[in-house]
Amino acid sequence: MDDRIEIRVGDITTLKVDAIVNAANNQLSGGSGVDGAIHRAAGAEQLQQACQLIGGCATGQVVKTKGFGLPAKAILHTVGPIWRGGGHNEPELLRSCYSECMTMAVREGYRSIAFPAISCGAYGYPTEQAVAIAVEEVDRCLQSFLCFRQVIFVCFDEAMASLYRQAT
Ligand code: AR6
């Protein structure tokens, strides 16, 4: 596993990295979970306004806003798939969230990024499978992004962190 990958337990909104990733919805309307935490910490009104201007985001894609009140420079809002049994392209869509975020980060000249466990909360993706995809895809991207410095997988609890450790 690439030694630029790090696993941490904590709140993603506190990290001073170039970009943090938000597990958003198609409307970019804010919500619960990590999305709610990011909106609150960034400044709900400003972030809401920026998201409204963008209009929305397709599942598996990514859009960017400033970080506003966050220590991070930018927020990459991606929309993970809702788990519907696994036969609705969920793995490909989840994989695409990670590769699109990494690609956008590199395009923007960012060198550090923090990911939450996309789709692993409200969207119900089986965590072990989601973690395997996350680690595999980021590791694959890092092989071509040699200038990239740091990828942090931020877990809300120790149980999730141990899944990541097993996968790396
Ligand atoms: N820092 C890091 N991880 C967190 C934080 C935090 N502050 N808060 C929660 N998590 P979820 P999803 C973890 O539900 O499944 C929203 O309403 C959490 O424990 O945030 O992609 C959106 O608007 C879990 O492991 O995202 C969408 O409608 C992981 O983040 C929908 O939920 C993701 O859980 C997206 O659902």
Image: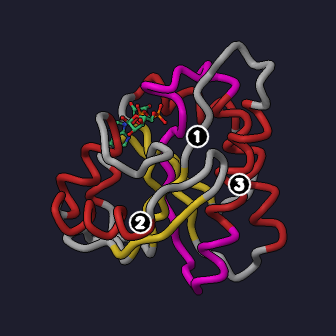
**From mark 2 to mark 3, how far is it between C-alphas?**
18 Å
SS label for mark 1: loop
Which residue type carries mark 1? Gly
Q: Which residues are magenta?
A: 103-129
Which residue in the rendered view is the most extreme toward the bottom?
109
Asked if the residue under mark 2 is in contact with the one under mark 1, i.e. CB atoms within 8 Å, the reply is no
Q: How many marks?
A: 3
Percent position of residue 50, x then y: 32, 70
Which residue type carries mark 2? Ile
Q: Is residue 61 above or below residue 33?
A: below
User: Earlier along the polypeptide chain: callout 3 or callout 1?
Assistant: 1
Q: Quick check: is 108 in the magenta stretch?
A: yes
Report which residue position mark 3 lands on: 138
Percent position of residue 133, x then y: 73, 38
Q: Is residue 89 above or below residue 20?
A: above
**From mark 1 to mark 2, how far is it between C-alphas?**
15 Å
* The image quadrant in which ligand 1 is located: top left
Label 1 CA crowd tier, 10 Å (few <14, some 14–19, many 20+): many
Report which residue position mark 1 lands on: 80
Task: Choose top left, top right, bottom left or bottom right for residue 10.
Answer: top left
SS label for mark 3: helix
Percent position of residue 79, x then y: 55, 46
Lateral position of residue 28 relative to residue 144, left or right: left
Determine whether the beta carbon of the residue marked 3 sits less than 8 angstroms from the nearest atom of ligand 1: no
Determine whether the beta carbon of the residue marked 1 sits less than 8 angstroms from the nearest atom of ligand 1: yes
Report which residue position mark 2 lands on: 75
Asked if the residue under mark 1 is in contact with the one under mark 3, i.e. CB atoms within 8 Å, the reply is no
Percent position of residue 105, x then y: 59, 73
Label 2 CA crowd tier, 10 Å (few <14, some 14–19, many 20+): many
User: Earlier along the polypeptide chain: callout 2 or callout 3?
Assistant: 2
